[in-house]
Amino acid sequence: MRLAMQDPCRIVTGILTVALMLVPAAARSQELDSAPEQVPLFGDTFESGNVCNWSSGAGFPQVCPYNFFCAGAPAPTSAADPLMLTGALTDFLSGNPIGGATVEARRQSGGTLLDSDTTVADGSFSLSASTGGIPLSAYLAIVAASYPSTYLYPADPFAADAVGLGVRAISTSSLSLAYFFAGLGVQTPNTGTTVILVADCDGVPIQGATVAFAPAAGALRYLESGTPSPSATATDATGAAMGFNAPPGNTSLSALFNGVSLESHSFVVYSSGLTGTLIHP
């Protein structure tokens, strides 16, 4: 606990890592790189595209530091069948593997269980789901002793295998410290916590974006110097925002950058749980 109190930035970064450490669906308009390497975490990968490929006009700024090449691109219509998700679960602060945790893949519609595995001593897990060749709208649910129940929602349906995922978790005590640093004291009973990453088409965090939840969280915080700030009004270089004391249930996420709306989507907030997701062009 002393280490955590001395390093609040690391604690909050760990919470954000929960949202970032899940590979997304295949890119909506371009193929994922076929090289056998770990794909970027919670960020779309595209074969090509400029760092900033916006046109002038149509509400877009003439100069921007981000790749919005994928904005408005159609989603993939086919998927691997079966689709594999494999990786390892570790503790963010210590880096130690978390054995004995339950990792589930569940369908977003209705929460139907697709597959489940229990992590072994090295934290590894392996999941498989039948897709029928159609992209799969699913999320991961993680349950481990001394950790809040954690739910990871990609922005897009899964369309390709994800192998070698590094999934990190943050402890319940560290989440409590995040509420303290956010100026909120303790978490309100029967509410949840959300972590959002705003990123461009390459998965690069977007600075200067604003997010909104419907229904609204009890408190919205953007990061400033590594901690959730009551005074920050937009994302910093981490591209991250947190919803504290959020009402449980279906929630819609939207975001704006330079007056341009990003691709909104829905996820679920769970009572006493931690939900991580991404929003992109």
Image (cartoon, helix red, strand yellow):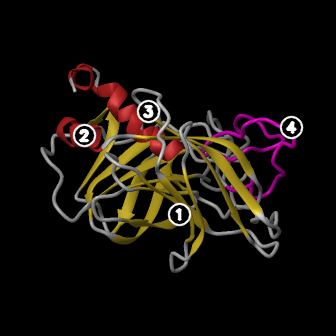
> Quick one: 131 or 94, which is closer to the camera?
94
Provide the residue span drawn in magenta.
Answer: 25-52
Instruction: Using the image, determine if residue 244 lies above or below residue 96.
Output: below
Q: Earlier in the sequence, mark 1 or mark 4?
A: 4
Give the SS element for disc 1. loop
Give the SS element for disc 3. loop
Q: Residue furthest left?
A: 185
Q: Earlier in the sequence, mark 2 or mark 4?
A: 4
Q: Earlier in the sequence, mark 3 or mark 2?
A: 3
Q: In screen coordinates, is 42 left or right of 189? A: right
Report how far apart the C-alphas of labels 3 and 4 lie in the structure.
27 Å
Q: Which residue is mark 1?
A: 264
Image disc number at residue 173: 2
Q: In screen coordinates, is 145 left or right of 106? A: left
Q: Residue at x 38, y 40 (%)?
A: 170
Q: Residues within 10 Å of mark 4 (few under 14, many from 20)?
A: few
Q: Which residue is mark 3?
A: 92
Which quadrant would residue 134 be assigned to in this image? bottom right
Which amino acid type corresponds to the residue marked 3 in the rendered image? Phe
> Quick one: 272 or 60, which is closer to the camera?
272
Image disc number at residue 35: 4
Q: Nearer the viewer, mark 1 or mark 4?
A: 4
Q: Nearer the viewer, mark 2 or mark 4?
A: 2
Give the SS element for disc 2. helix
Which amino acid type corresponds to the residue marked 4 in the rendered image? Ala
